[in-house]
Amino acid sequence: MSGTHRRAGLSRPFAFWLIATVQCLLLFASSAPSPLYAVYQGQWHFSAGMLTAIFAMYALTLLAALLVVGKLSDHIGRRKVLGAALVVEVVSMLLFITADGVGPLLAARAAQGLATGAATGATSSALLDLQPPHRPRLGPLVNSLAPIAGLALGALGSGLLVEYAPAPEVLVYALLLAAFALAALVTPLLPETSPGRPGAAASLVPRLAVPRRIRPLFLTVAPSLVAVWAVGGLYMSLGPSIAAHTLRLGGHLVGGLVIFAQTGSGAVGALLRRGKPPRATMTLGFAAFLIGIGTTLGALAVPSPALFFAGIVIAGYGFGTGFLGAFQTIAPLAEPDERAGLMAGMYVVCYLGFSVPAVIAGLAVQRYGLGPTTTVYSVAVMALAVVACAGLLVQGRGEKRAATAPYGGLPPAPQPARAADADHL
């Protein structure tokens, strides 16, 4: 494709919001099974370890897709990758609808992870490509807001259907199937925003495509992303069990409300902090996250459902604002033909935190119990967040000293050429 991008039938502003809706729907679908896990456990009698394995199947296949095809849309175009991902998502919805045991459920989550991972690099990059030139923070804002809002709405919507609707294990997926099929039909009408470049086959070699000049900041931010997404993974997989067994809260809707409280407050936090300085937003978010997790630990010790939900809301606010600040800090540094690779790299870090600790927690629950596992898990992510916050503060002070001492300090290092910048982690 030439440097002049081909346009299709949809305007760029409409395409921007359509892609944001698709991104939200993908994460809506990813959290929809969480309130249904209790239903599946009642039908098929599997353990907490198997529950987290089902959850992890989604996250690990998503990671594999991010590493293998996360950069592909930089080479062959956003539309092709998104269209293929939506077809796989439709297949995953069909697998959910027809699932009659743990094996088909694992297959459905695997297909869903592959679809979401493949789409993530394309949708995140397209939102940056299509954002209005006079609103350079809109793309990072929507990129951080749409996934969190999708997680919140998926958990709440599925929880409501489980509690009040007939055949919830079919209905939610049938509705999503219709939505994804429609999105797949509309995708060819989107304007293509990627200039395309050679090397599509080479881009499939798994690696984190973080340009060299961005790596120091990326590595500083990464521990914080792992910490906040690790808490998301805990409550997405074991949140309903924590509410039922530790807090003695019954009903299928409660599990959805736990996830909604966390991710919904994260979406509100991202909205409230839009337009604010990214570094301050990121630091404030991680500080709120620490306070929120400490509050939930106190609530589990009492135990107090009201205090628990208050802590979840505060931690969720920290999750949303911290993620927004990280996105606003890093995303604008990438050139257009680097965006899919960088976005995939960020989400690899996020989903490593989302999946691996949750699987470890699921195994630990079987041996040590839900309460001790939740406590140790929470303390560990708090410690990681403290280390990450300290790194951000140290780096910020170093940058401030360098900015205020242009003659006394060392001269800035020259920017590497783009050819050298192509090296990857």
Image: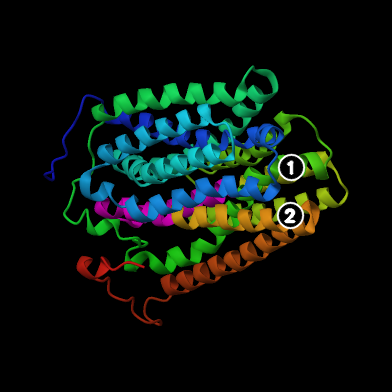
Query: Disc 2 marks which residue?
Result: 365
The type of residue carrying mark 1 is: Ser
Classify the position of the N terminus by image quarter: top left
Q: Which residue is drawn at 37% across and 76% down?
A: 406
* CA neighbours of label 1 inside 10 A, class few (<14), some (14 to 19), many (20+): many
Residue that extends furthest to the right in the rendered view of this protein: 302
Q: In which quarter of the image is residue 35?
A: top right
The residue stretch that appears in magenta: 318-346
Tell me what residue is drawn at x 45 percent, y 70 percent.
399
Q: Is residue 277 visible?
A: no
Residue kind at label 2, given as amino acid type: Val
Q: 71 above or below 172?
A: below
Query: Regarding mark 1 in the picture, which secondary structure is present there?
Result: helix
Find the distance from the CA under tag 1 to the CA under tag 2.
11 Å
Residue at 50% in and 67% down: 396
Callout 1 touching callout 2 (CB < 8 Å) = yes
**Tag 2, which secondary structure?**
helix
| Vertical order, 43 against 226 (above or below) | above
Q: How crowded is mark 2: few (under 14 residues within 10 Å), some or many (20 or more)?
A: some
Q: Mark 1 points at which residue?
A: 241
